[in-house]
Amino acid sequence: MQYDVILPAAGSGKRMAAGCNKLFLELRQKPILIHTLEVFQQDDACKGIWLAVKPEERSYIESLLVKYNITKVKALSDGGAERQYSVNACVKKVKDRDIVLVHDAARPFITIPIIHKLAEVAHSKGAAIAGVRAKDTMKRVKDGMIEETVDRSSLWMIQTPQAFDFEVLKRAEQLAERDHFLGTDEAMLVERMGHSVYIVESSYENVKITTKEDLVFGEAILSQRIGG
Ligand code: C5P
């Protein structure tokens, strides 16, 4: 199943406190952004990559694309103040596509089998998102006190990629923009249209690099995958 992917890369990474876009930090001497891009560059089913970037980082990112021979990028769009606006800027540029995935550029450990499963389910059902089952006991807390223990069996922790029939994603983005609705992920925009969204079981390794500890975790994942 062929697909295109939108990669929002225009965040500021405040929780990393790196003093620069966290995507430029390196794991094994390679920027996190490039690790993520290489997954899609190497996947034959991926036909195009659509990047959202900060205007002031555009030329540096363009230089990275040349240096690491990332050839599938179709367009760089100016990101917005919120992740949803960055994704929407890319959605507006994509034309006549069948399946489009949205994936955080800060999740470099996604694997091709999960991507393909998502694209397949999006093709048959319209919308599919990656997630993992909650591992810990879950409780609802208010004012420092437990209100209830939540039944964990139906709880999933949601990741990206999130994969869509492009018409469904485009419509969801248009309606969110019209209504000034800000969601926490693309699926939420699709859910509010009344469209069903399906879950694809992903991996706990598909972390979003967010804080300094995640860099240690990232190095460990790479050591296990490629040795050394
Ligand atoms: O900040 P966080 O890691 O949750 O952001 C997830 C992804 O969305 C990152 O790849 C980040 O670069 C991107 N993002 C964006 N525009 C924003 C905020 C985040 O493209 N305004």
Image (cartoon, rainbow, N blue to C red):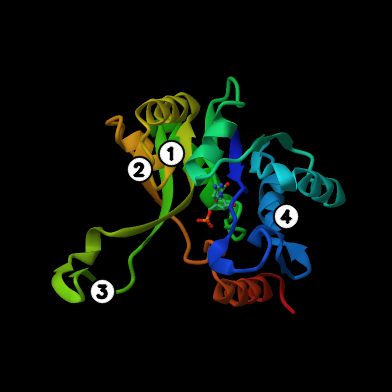
Residue at numbered disc 1 = 121
Of residues 16 and 41, the one drawn nearer to the viewer in this rendering: 16
**Residue 222 locus on image (x, y percent):** 66, 71
How much space separates mark 1 and mark 3, taking CA atoms?
29 Å
How much space separates mark 1 and mark 2, taking CA atoms?
8 Å
Q: Is residue 89 left or right of residue 118?
A: right
Tag shown at residue 198: 2
Residue at image position (58%, 52%) is: 11
Which-is-in-front pick, marks 1 and 2?
Answer: 2
Of residues 96 and 125, the one drawn nearer to the viewer in this rendering: 96
Amino acid beneath label 4 = Ile
Tag shown at residue 137: 3
* Badge 1 or badge 3: first in the primary sequence: 1
How much space separates mark 4 and mark 1, taking CA atoms?
27 Å
How much space separates mark 4 and mark 2, taking CA atoms?
29 Å
Neighbour class for label 4 at 10 Å: few (<14), some, many (≥20)?
A: many
Neighbour class for label 1 at 10 Å: few (<14), some, many (≥20)?
A: many
User: Tag 2, which secondary structure?
Assistant: strand
